[in-house]
Image (cartoon, rainbow, N blue to C red):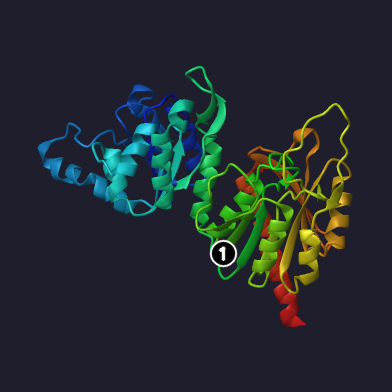
Amino acid sequence: MRVVLGVGGGIAAYKAAELVRALTRQGHSVQVVMTAAAQQFIQPLTFAALTGQKVITGLFPEIPAVDQLSSAVEHIAVAQEHDLLVVAPATADLLAKFAAGLADDFLSTLYLAFTGAVVLAPAMNTNMWNHAATQSNLAVLRARGHIFVEPEEGWLACGTTGPGRLTDPERIAAVVNRLARNKHDFSGEYVLVTAGPTQEPLDPVRFVSNRSSGKMGYALANAAAARGAHVVLVSGPVSLPPPLDVELIHVSTAQQMHDAVLEHLERASIIIKAAAVADYRLTDVPALKMKKTAARLSLNLDPTPDILADVGQRKGDRLLIGFAAETDHLVDEARRKMHSKNCDMMVANFVGDGAGFDSDVNEVTILTRAGETFQAGPAQKSEIAERILDQVLRLRLTLRTVAETA
């Protein structure tokens, strides 16, 4: 792809050089545009050496009179000649300019003239990231359909710890590569995904749940939508931004998730059950908050609906993909679950010692009913999602071929 890389003014600007290397290694051509502030952190010469192209540093560079006309419309030419605009780091200032439609430098002017896909990788101080103004700007830009590569939590240059650190350049490059593939191999598929935990109430203020963050299910929903599927995501309570181009249904309890899945099952062609559904719920939930006493408390728990098993009984010729989170005998348990629930594929991941929970990285084993085993990861969950969907598509094509030749 022909990529424009906009570099904003922040300490994370040095990571943009790593991003250029990652993109050029994958065969993309990269045109770097730097803001004036970015040049205070890293020199244009660095990017010129990495890309083999001149670096654009402003709207009004010192140019001979004969070249002034071409320079005056250069932002239009760059916008028309490139496929993708990536901004990393996308500072709070740039996000505000983009959201408001301001155009006072080359990058913000280019943004308004650009008609292709836009990928934004924010980086800033935690308080700036959490500020209501920034969050409002993010909402505006998400509504425009821009793709965000969310910042990570960690130690920041300002000496604080929290969200705001520019994510790994390899992760940004992976997003670009996904867009470059421009896959629409799931066109015509209706993909039903579940994600996150469920919360089973103990009283009006307490509940039983688990440590699932929902990140794997959301990554799958994002990836399927990007590859052309109509996606319905049934999500338990999570702290994640809504995926783009996905029909999102919020639920809380296992029963609610069960009902939502069955409601959409008839239209679905592929069901991916990535949610970590609670196995038990309180038999009778009191209407009032339970009071703490010195006496020991025992709770009567009933099994929650087995959503995967119920779908397995009703699936017909639909593809059913389950998830198995295990602390021991990972592959054996996943295989047992796959056959007992009538799944076509099972994705198994180890969760002992907190592994796999609330992380952007995962490592899974993919099993099929035909006895095949595939490893994926360790890698970003966005990449794991792509690998899972690759295997789903391969299985879909295999089954169709068998049906056509039968």
Please state if 131 lies on the left or on the right of 294 as rendered: left
Residue for point 32% across, 50% down: 114
Kind of residue indicated by mark 1: Ala
Q: Nearer the viewer, residue 384 or 241?
A: 241
The kind of secondary structure element at disc 1 is: loop
Residue 217 pos. (x, y %) = 65, 51
Residue 373 pos. (x, y %) = 80, 54
Residue for point 15% across, 41% down: 67
Residue for point 42% across, 51% down: 143
List the single residue furthest toward the left.
Answer: 65
Q: Nearer the viewer, residue 20 or 93?
A: 93
Residue 349 pos. (x, y %) = 77, 45
Quadrant of residue 356 within the rendered picture: top right
At label 1, counting other C-alpha atoms closer than 10 Å, the crowd grade (few under 14, some 14-19, many 20 or more) is many
- Residue 367 in sight here: yes
Residue 159 pos. (x, y %) = 51, 17
The image shows residue 32, relative to residue 252, as above or below, that is above
Residue behind mark 1:
229
Q: Nearer the viewer, residue 154 or 209?
A: 209
Please state if 342 lies on the left or on the right of 289 as rendered: right
The image shows residue 282, relative to residue 133, as above or below, that is below
- Residue 53 in sight here: no
